[in-house]
Amino acid sequence: MRSGLPRVAASTAPATLPPPLPGLDPAWSRLVTVGGGAAGRSGGAARPPRTWHLLDTAGSLEAIGVTPVGTILCVHGNPTWSYLWRSVAARTLAVAQAGGPAWRVVAVDQLDMGFSERTADQHRLADRVRDLGALTDELRLTGPVVTLGHDWGGVVSLGWAVDHPDLVVAVATCNTAVHQPDEAPIPAPLRLALRPGVLGRGTVLTPAFLETTLAIAHPKLDRSVADGYRAPYRGAARRGGIGGFVADIPVDATHPSADELDRIATGVAALEVPALVMWGPRDPVFLERYLDDLVERLPHADVHRFEGAGHLLPDDADVAGTVLDWLGDHLPDGRPTDGAEPSLPADARPGTGARTDAPYRPLWAALDELADDHGPALVEMAAAGGPRTVSWRLLAQRVHEIAAGLADLGVRPGDRVSLLVTPGADLTAVLYACVRIGAVVVVADAGLGLRGLTRAVRGARPDWVIGALPGLGAARTLGWPGRRIATVSLPGPARKALGVEHTLVEVARRGAARLAAGEQLPDAPTPDAPAAVLFTSGSTGPAKGVVYTHGQLAAVRDVLAAQYGVGTGTGLVAGFAPFALLGPALGARSVAPDMDVTAPRTLTARAVADAVAAADATVVFLSPAALANVVATASALTAADRTALGRVRLFLSAGAPVSATLLAAATELMPHAAAHTPYGMTEGLLMTDVDLAGVRAASSAPDDGICVGRPAGGVRVRIAPLDDAGEPTGDLTERAGVTGEVVVAAPHVRDHYDRLWRTDRVSRLGVDDPRGHRTGDVGHLDADGRLWIEGRLQHVVTTPHGVVTPVGPEQRIERVEGVGRAGVAGTGPSGTQQVVAVVETVPAARRPGLASADLAAAVRAAAEVPLAAVLVVPALPTDIRHNSKVDRARLSRWASTVLGGGRMVRP
């Protein structure tokens, strides 16, 4: 009898085959009886015979005439069953039938679960591991075996792996845990389920526990699929195993299964086989701390967090495809590869101007060199009480003090420090202090919005958070991880409420005392050590963490210095945070203009002129949205403002396409400045460059898209041609006129994505340069070696007549009288999509709707592609960070809805 569970939980029933269910091939199901004799290789006393239901694709593989390269042993958790792994079974068979590696799938229903036998026994964790071993003995399972487990099935599968080192060649898990820390309670949903009076009622007598698990799928399960999960658990007599599983959760060290969990946890840390850890962050039970623990025990593991997915990961995300891709990389024939990186072929080396043999200079080298200089290093225009100037000497001193103080507090190399500070002196000093002692800075700017910031910070799992009041308040309210340091002084009650342990002033004083006592800063990190996690804008999906090493950040600095001649003595106005932070690395005095960094359009022409005058700046860098408002507010400039702007010699704008008209208008304000628009991304901040003359020359070219110029020094650009389905499947080429995904390679390209193994893999797929990166942008090279951007890969429209890239039609539509901006999107199934144009009118439309007949006719004539509809909106949706990239995916969803009969609301 199971302790704490109702009598009905002790019901017995034979194993059966499942009824017909969606996605489940009856040919996979079999019943296997185990036991009734001496103990097998898994040890323990002989047990009575028990019959298991399991899915086994061995027969299906034999039917198509292929021999398995190995077995994927799949173990479900609670309250699911082998139905969880139906996509893995189907996908492996499809791959085998297509000529790929043939992996046999064995997916078990644990005893008292699914359609396996109901035994009325209490199965402890050790019993489940031992029972699984007895089953694989009965199956005469031989290696190579890859384990794949979910929930508590992950623990059982890892226990089996620990006990079968001669068979296991790799392990993979989905949302599981092998250790419950003493200082942390088990998650709240499990605490509730284990309460007296709730355990039996919530797990056995009613289907509440099962229904709750099905309800937290993201996206919501189809009813037929949910019914598939319910099928073996209809009636309390069949749900005893669900209650027994919950009762066996080791809540503390006194629990009967705690020792077995500890044994497995210790064994997992000793595993040396390839490991894949997959995670759904929207899981209320398996929290991120369990992911951290697994990664600490398996430091060599590949990790992929499926942003937006939750607990039922194999249903929420493409687990099957991820596992097979991973196996293809690590175990192409069922055996591990040697893991060696491909050598760099001669024809894949960076282009002309590369300085890969240049000596490494740390990011803080210029700061150290200017440590005795009393000249200005930083100017904050928005500081309370008026502009504030920080000298090189003071900045260097502050960096060293904060670095020493952080080290004294226990910040160690590799620790992650989230910086929730607006651009300015505090952010600069903290950033350089962190990188100097080898801490990894996590930078996700406020332009992501609160929701995006929450995803980013939680995903990065910082050890420390350094922030101003808004950031600390959000961290406290939303439960962001990390010990907290405030950039401002706070009264005791506020410190306690925000969970603040120290202030930045206290840290600096602590460091100053250590330095005064003769202590030295820790050894500097090596060039290949991680330095930063920088988050993308989130304009094409959830923001991704991009990891840079110290060497790669130094290479970013060097390519900017070489391309634009920015260095010691240069005055730099940076209205774009990444470049403001690079100012000290370049030896340039930097000024942050008076603006709201979360809203680039708040920057005015007068604010730029004031910033230029304050720092005697000769270089200005602004985002396109900021630049547009600067031009729009130029009428407010005074004669003195115009004189200051006349001293600017170089003007840069990047982050989104910049038109020749906008660049020309900017040069009217800065008449002696060369106007440039570099092309890049968070993963590589400078890939190509074009000046205003180049933009004007390109305007008369027949090419579709936006000309972003020629590769910067050390950068190689190639194209992966698109096929008829809009996929970049062709071999990389530098041939002119070929449209496809833009692929770049350079010393300053990012190292990898953070805990996004599959995303990282896709970004390198088919790229023969370890410094290469698939950008996700679509474009082509012309005969002069210039790169033209035609849109994003996910925005390519696949029509019955061929592939349509959006930027060309958008540009032609924007030349129609009465049209401001335009967005082109596709509606309908891939391959038969229809093209829709959505435009802003001048003057702006008051509400969304169909375009007038005259406007629609003019737009159709200009587009040069068949249009299913022309719609007008007051304003096109754009990304948060830049306020300028049109959200074509959102337009596509909106157009599909309104053209399908939905309400005509704003997109």
Image (cartoon, helix red, strand yellow):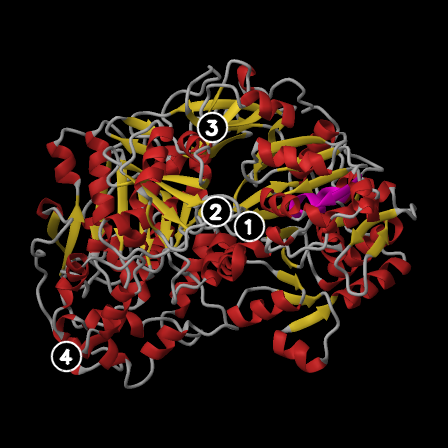
Sequence-wise, which precedes: disc 3 or disc 4? 4
Query: Could you tell me which secondary element the residue under label 1 belongs to?
Result: loop
Which dot, 4 or 2, sits closer to the camera?
2
Evaluate whether residue 453 shows in this view.
no
Sequence-wise, which precedes: disc 1 or disc 4? 4
Residue drawn at x 80%, y 52% as measured from the top left: 379
Could you say where residue 38 lies in the image, as x and y percent from the top left? 19, 57
Looking at the rendered structure, the kind of residue marked 3 is Gly
Query: Could you tell me which secondary element the residue under label 2 belongs to?
Result: loop
Which residue was labeled with disc 4?
A: 8
Mark 2–mark 3 Cα distance, whole angstroms, equals 19 Å
Q: Is residue 56 left or right of residue 591?
A: left
Mark 3–mark 4 Cα distance, whole angstroms, equals 69 Å
Looking at the rendered structure, the kind of residue marked 4 is Val
Looking at the rendered structure, the kind of residue marked 2 is Ser
Query: Could you tell me which secondary element the residue under label 3 belongs to?
Result: loop
Residue 620 picture quarter = top right
The numbered disc on residue 793 is none
The numbered disc on residue 539 is 2
- Reply above or below: 246 against 41: below
Whether label 1 touches label 2, CB < 8 Å: yes
Sequence-wise, which precedes: disc 2 or disc 3? 2
Which dot, 1 or 4, sits closer to the camera?
1
Mark 4–mark 2 Cα distance, whole angstroms, equals 53 Å
- Would residue 73 be counted in the magenta stretch? no
**Range of magenta residues:** 571-583
Compare residues 715 and 641 and report the one nearer the observer: 641
Mark 1–mark 4 Cα distance, whole angstroms, equals 57 Å
Which residue was labeled with disc 3?
A: 705
Looking at the rendered structure, the kind of residue marked 1 is Arg
